[in-house]
Image: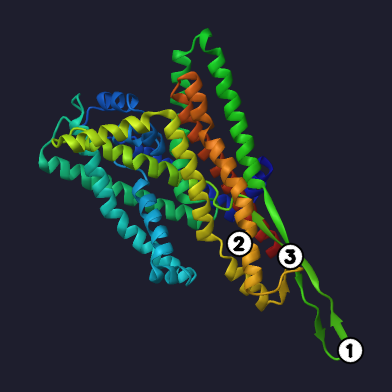
Amino acid sequence: MWETLKRAWKVKEVRNSILFVLAMMVIFRVMANIPLPGVDLIALRRFFESNQVLGLLNIFSGGTLSRFSIVALGVAPYITASIIFQLLGMIVPSIEEIQKEGEAGQKRINQWTRLLTVPLAIIQSFSLLALLKQSQVTILTNTDFLHLVVLICSVTAGTMLLTWIGELISERKVGNGISLLIFAGIVAGLPSLVRQLGATYDSSQMFTLVLYVLVAVVMIAGVVFVNEGQRNIPIQYARQSAGSSSSVGGVASSLPLRVLTAGVIPIIFAISLLIFPSVLAQFFSQARTPAVADAARWVLTVLQDQWIYGMLYFFLVVLFTYFYTGVIFHPDRIAENLQKSGGFIPGIRPGKPTSDYLQAVINRITLGGAIFLGLIAVMPNIAQGITGSTTFALGGTSLLIVVSVVIESIKQIESQLTMREYDAY
């Protein structure tokens, strides 16, 4: 990794891209520390610390919620909008056709995603304010209608600004912009987490600390192992005639299929989906209708159970791994391109048999990758169930995202360097 960064620093275009990304991260962290008026930050921080689900939401947003900054929601509304359109692409034929249009279709989907982000940000910010108003301690010191409208508009504008920054980062081809913003928020919160552990540590917690370190090492090794794993499918290109007396021999190649094609996206999607019912239940827990309030409290009680939460987390990670792999991997297109270029898989007929073969292979290797990623994701929850420390659940999820984002960014930087090395020749 360090060798890649040294090489990247020597290439002007890549170096400028990295510096631009770092500058955008600094801007993000500056905005994350600009609080909105009319909020008791001390009471707000205690409120988040007392609730595990909201604490996870705070970690996921990069600590912006506990400060109630102008980017309090982070990029969560944009991620929700992305999930909605990807689901619609699987069930609505017209949207699926647009997704197949290549770059032009992707631009249209991205524009619709941005437009959907605005109402989602308004709804989520309104729900958050309503949740804070229902808390037993006074968090909002000013609840005037006009003031609440200003807060909602400010948070929504902050989310759209972060979305724009994320897209600017993605255009630099050194990592996914949205993932890097989440990464920046998590890394910025690590010093306070270490400080918190140091303040509460005593000799009786040695077993907990050692277990935490072991879990972290296993998770890092596991994520690297899964991200680097791939299955190479042999590709043979047919012999071609060159004139009447000579011929060009067939060329052997390979098609690499990654064990974890979806990368870190399943983790982000799973967390988003797990957080949504919890926040909604928090909102309705003080409802005037007894049946609604009881149902909301039941949901909160169920999701507070570590084993149920862990099983749901594991299932969603596996589900979204398959889902996102199906979104970005199209065996029919690969088979069609191979047939047009004269390539084939030895022993497999071109066309639909090739497509079916590729689909079977990706399903088989994705199963192993999805289960492995799911186990790594819930490993901190298992450790938390053993030790009773909430640090494992939050820190484990954060570590998983950080390692995956770093690997993804390094790979994109290596691709940029390789492309420029070819251009030099």
Q: Image check: 298 left or right of 135?
A: right
Q: Image check: 408 left or right of 268?
A: right
Q: Image check: 376 left or right of 414?
A: left
- Whichever of labels 3 and 2 marks the residue nearer the N terminus, that label is 2
Quadrant in which the C terminus appears: bottom right
Query: Where is mark 1, residue-wise?
Result: 245
Mark 2 is surrounded, within 10 Å at the Cα level, by few (under 14), some (14 to 19) or many (20 or more) other residues, namely some
Label 3 or label 2, whichever lies nearer to me, is: 2
- Give how far apart the Cα atoms at labels 3 and 2 are: 37 Å
| SS state under label 2 | helix
> Is residue 279 in view?
yes
Residue closer to the observer: 35 or 86: 86
Q: Is residue 82 above or below residue 423?
A: above
Query: Where is mark 3, residue-wise?
Result: 425
- Whichever of labels 3 and 1 marks the residue nearer the N terminus, that label is 1
Q: Is residue 361 above or below residue 187?
A: below
The x and y percentages for residue 82 are 40, 55
The x and y percentages for residue 245 are 89, 89
